[in-house]
Amino acid sequence: MCAIVATGDGSVTLRSAVVVGEDGLGETYHSLRGAVGESMHVFVGAGFDFSLSRKIFEMGFGTGLNAWLTLLEAERMGVAVDYVAVEKYPVDMGVASSLRYGFVGVGEAVVGEVVAGGMEGAAAGGRDERFMALHAAPWGEWVRVTEGFRLLKIGGDVAELLSRESSFDDIFSAPQPPSGGAEDFFEVRRYAANDNFDTPIPHGRDKRASRKPEKTDLEGFDVVYWDAFAPDVQPELWTEGLFGRVFAVMAHGGVLVTYSAKGSVRRALAAAGFEVERLPGALGKRHMLRAVKA
């Protein structure tokens, strides 16, 4: 089971029990400098806010932190978002609940201000059920988490997904494994990809519950959160070939953001067709990367 680890900004992250580095320790899901601070800086700030994105693809749903902070920022901005996330190693619901990200006041405090006060005082408010709704959402189905935030979680390997699919639309109809026990935790509302936002489907078994997501007429992803484990640990997820497949499913002008600024990553992105720029990294880290499909 993943271990919960404190980070420098007062928030917590997980240490993987599956992906292990050369030091023999499990890789952490977020920077030890600060989980929430890194997410806000790299993904929400340099990605979502920069691109005014509406269609998001995340490599590595993980703890759900990136998705949750994006949901909060989208609500603050008053925009609707379609969010697709791929995850090979889903986090157990009990572990997700222990992360304490989803307490009223915690997320609100860090949108615009990195972790103002950390996790202290979170228990004074009630749980923000939007966070656990992200984890409770069934795999392979569109779920409307809030009025303007729709989520599609895809279980499996992103390299296999992108290698076998030929278009942006096809990603939404890829076959999915079982969700692993998330059902019935939260009263989510389920949607097929082409359903109107104003037509909720009550949680529970119905004719659409097991149906694959249908194709959409969207042109491509506006922003990609590339949050895989480090290139030294998972080099197969940082290649020119894989970035080329990501490039193919992005909209013109779309951006890919990642915490890694490694030279091999920068060269792979450029070789795949992106215009790549180095930006200041999060919480004292020297650099991060933003790549644009020009």
Image (cartoon, rainbow, N blue to C red):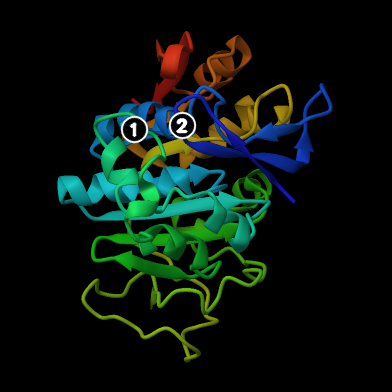
Tell whether label 1 touches label 2 (CB within 8 Å): yes
Task: Estimate how packed mark 1 is, as few (under 14), some (14 to 19) or many (20 or more) residues with alpha carbons within 10 Å.
Answer: some
Instruction: Identify the amino acid type marked 1.
Output: Gly
Disc 2 or 1, which lies upstream in sequence? 2
Q: Position of residue 292 (x, y in %)?
A: 37, 25
Residue toward you, 269 or 261 = 261
Q: Position of residue 27 (x, y in %)?
A: 70, 32
For label 2, the SS is loop
- Identify the residue shown where x is 74% and y is 27%: 233
Say if residue 191 shows up in the picture: no
Instruction: Identify the amino acid type marked 2.
Output: Gly
- Identify the residue shown where x is 40% and y is 69%: 143
Q: Which residue is mark 1?
A: 117
Q: Which residue is mark 2?
A: 10
Q: Position of residue 64 (x, y in %)?
A: 49, 50
For label 1, the SS is loop
Q: Position of residue 134 (x, y in %)?
A: 45, 60
Residue toward you, 88 or 166 = 88
Tally of numbered tags: 2
